[in-house]
Image (cartoon, coloured by chain):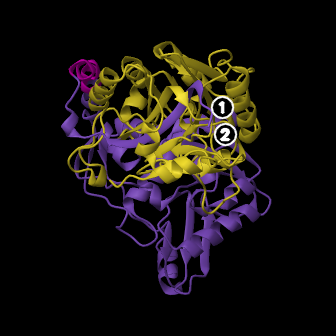
């Protein structure tokens, strides 16, 4: 058997090493991080508003105070940007229930609160949608039967999950109108199977993260006290009539 | 952990019978050179360790600890290279406050040698990535993103060759398709090229034209896609190409307890590894070269 003088890869060994507290902290690295950490923590923990109560996304079947707050924030914060870019107004907002990642605790609201409720980087987009796409969206909401946060939409279901009222911006849905629906980029791209968004006519990127909209909103108001209301509910005709009579 | 031994070349029947240690002692050893490859992926701005309340990640991770481990390994073997397979950015407020400045500065302090680019590294737009480039004292390699019509033009190399103790180690990078994953507005005119074609080309260039002893692919394609098995992934790259020794992966946050050994298109073994995410683990692959009297049919023993 012949042998040759050569460099030869004789052995490969693979290992996975866990990073845990047995390794100790590298002092140089830790002291380099320290000023950044202090600044971030100080900023995250500074109080920017006050929450009147504890709000959880489990607080209602089809709409919740915290979900209404989220959708209303997107409406209020994105509207001036959308208006200045397109000359049009936002008609409604739809987000997803799963996107609310934490409760809003009673008491001081900090920037960290916004990170906890919205840890993702999703940004606001506005989709122009005609009636057919709006219909798909409503069918989705009826089928999902979840408290997906909405604003500007009124959707009432009968006990048998039939739509008894569907209004956008206080008016019945118009077959010739194009609606501007604000959501986030995750949902636009089919997140939570909201595939109808992509069937919209056009999409406008606001370059405005949901979390930043929350932080800006919290800075604007001293006290946050969102309410559960009748924007998306299950009802029956008698309650419906009572509500209509009382002018709500 | 139970470790297993494999033989890299299928032709090495005799070595297989003798087993790893016997095979090693069966010829004259003049000299051994060990190249140590360390790697992370999908660290996602996790700079501080997880706290005690963080579930299964509790008390794990942390750059300052990783630094100690890397330092110790470098002290043991100076012929060490340190790589990252992308998604350096996004995941903690450090990224939101500093846009990746701290991530790149710390990786520079840890003396990373090269990294490839993940989809989340575009999260502040290609301009946001460009803005942080001065903080990175390590190389970026990507072979299938064509940045020529973007601000990143010239800042990312298709491949890079490192020399350690006379051993040539060729590195190239593969990125995931950005369309549908990242908003176009963010990646702008970055062009995505077919990873298999590019990998075939790169591995040939590195192994045969450049004469590299080792060819390593830094990939952000993802380990594999069970529900979409045709989607290009590290396992598909491994099977469809040859001349790649190691694929260091990312994107799918796959916690591999040990590297996967896959057969390439020439029937040779290729290692695929990925260490989950958030800097919870460091991957280590040692390549041991013998110089001296070598039997031509002798294979490579793989211990994982």
Residue at 42 percent across and 73 percent down: it is A61
Q: Residue A192 lies in what quarter of the image?
A: bottom right
Q: Is B122 inside the magenta-drawn segment?
A: no
Q: Colour of chain A?
A: purple
Q: Residue B186 lies in what quarter of the image?
A: top right
- Judge whether A111 appears above or below A178 on screen: above
- What kind of secondary structure does the magenta stretch mostly adopt? helix
List the residue tagged with mark 1.
B187
- In this image, B235 relative to B83: left or right? right
Chain in yellow?
B
Total residue callouts:
2
- Crowdedness near tag 1: few (<14), some (14–19) or many (≥20) residues, C-alpha within 10 Å: many
Q: Residue B238 lies in what quarter of the image?
A: top right
A160 or B268, nearer to the observer: B268
Helix, strand or loop at label 1? It is helix
List the residue tagged with mark 2.
B178
Q: Which residues are magenta?
A: A27-38
Looking at the rendered image, the quarter that the N terminus of chain A falls into is top right
- Judge whether B173 appears above or below A236 on screen: above
- Judge whether B58 appears above or below A41 on screen: below
């Amino acid at each position: 058997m012949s042998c040759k003088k050569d460099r030869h890869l004789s052995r490969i060994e693979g290992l996975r090493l866990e990073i845990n507290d047995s390794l100790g902290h590298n002092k140089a690295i830790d002291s380099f991080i320290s000023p950044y950490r202090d600044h971030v923590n100080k900023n995250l923990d500074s109080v920017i508003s006050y929450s009147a109560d504890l709000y959880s996304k489990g607080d209602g079947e089809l709409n919740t105070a915290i979900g209404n707050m989220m959708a209303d924030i997107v409406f209020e914060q994105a509207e001036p940007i959308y208006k200045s870019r397109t000359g049009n107004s936002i008609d409604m907002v739809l987000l997803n229930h799963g996107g609310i990642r934490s409760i809003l605790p009673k008491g001081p609201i900090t920037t960290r609160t916004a990170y906890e409720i919205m840890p993702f980087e999703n940004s606001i987009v506005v989709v122009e949608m005609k009636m057919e796409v709006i219909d798909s969206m409503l069918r989705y909401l009826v089928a999902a039967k979840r408290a997906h946060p909405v604003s500007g939409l009124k959707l009432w279901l009968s006990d048998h999950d039939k739509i008894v009222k569907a209004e956008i911006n206080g008016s019945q849905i118009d077959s010739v109108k194009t609606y501007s629906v604000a959501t986030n980029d995750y949902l636009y791209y089919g997140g939570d199977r909201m595939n109808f968004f992509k069937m919209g006519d056009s999409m406008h990127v606001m370059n405005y993260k949901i979390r930043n909209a929350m932080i800006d909103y919290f800075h604007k108001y001293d006290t946050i006290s969102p309410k559960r209301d009748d924007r998306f509910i299950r009802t029956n005709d008698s309650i419906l009539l009572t509500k209509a009579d009382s002018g709500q | 952990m139970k470790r297993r031994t494999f033989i890299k070349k299928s032709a090495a029947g005799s070595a297989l019978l003798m087993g790893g240690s016997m095979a090693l002692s069966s010829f004259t050893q003049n000299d051994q050179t060990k190249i140590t490859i360390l790697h992370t992926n999908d660290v996602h701005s996790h700079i501080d360790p997880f706290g005690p309340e963080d579930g299964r990640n509790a008390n794990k991770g942390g750059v300052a600890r990783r630094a100690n481990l890397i330092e110790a390994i470098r002290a043991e073997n100076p012929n060490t290279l340190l790589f990252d397979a992308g998604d350096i950015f996004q995941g903690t407020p450090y990224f939101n406050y500093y846009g990746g400045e701290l991530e790149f500065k710390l990786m520079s302090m840890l003396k990373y040698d090269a990294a490839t680019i993940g989809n989340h590294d575009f999260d502040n737009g290609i301009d946001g990535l460009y803005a942080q480039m001065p903080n990175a004292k390590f190389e970026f390699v990507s072979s299938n993103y064509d940045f020529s019509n973007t601000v990143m033009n010239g800042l990312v190399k298709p491949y890079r060759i490192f020399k350690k103790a006379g051993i040539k180690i060729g590195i190239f990078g593969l990125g995931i398709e950005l369309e549908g994953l990242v908003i176009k507005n963010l990646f702008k005119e970055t062009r995505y090229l077919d990873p298999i074609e590019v990998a075939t080309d790169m591995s040939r260039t590195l192994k045969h034209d450049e004469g590299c002893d080792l060819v390593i692919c830094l990939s952000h394609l993802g380990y594999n896609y069970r529900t979409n098995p045709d989607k290009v992934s590290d396992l598909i790259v491994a099977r469809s190409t040859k001349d790649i020794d190691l694929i260091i992966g990312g994107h799918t946050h796959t916690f591999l307890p040990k590297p996967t050994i896959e057969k390439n298109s020439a029937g040779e073994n290729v290692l695929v590894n990925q260490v989950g995410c958030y800097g919870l683990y460091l991957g280590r692959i040692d390549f041991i070269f013998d110089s001296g009297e070598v039997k031509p049919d002798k294979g490579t023993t793989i211990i994982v």
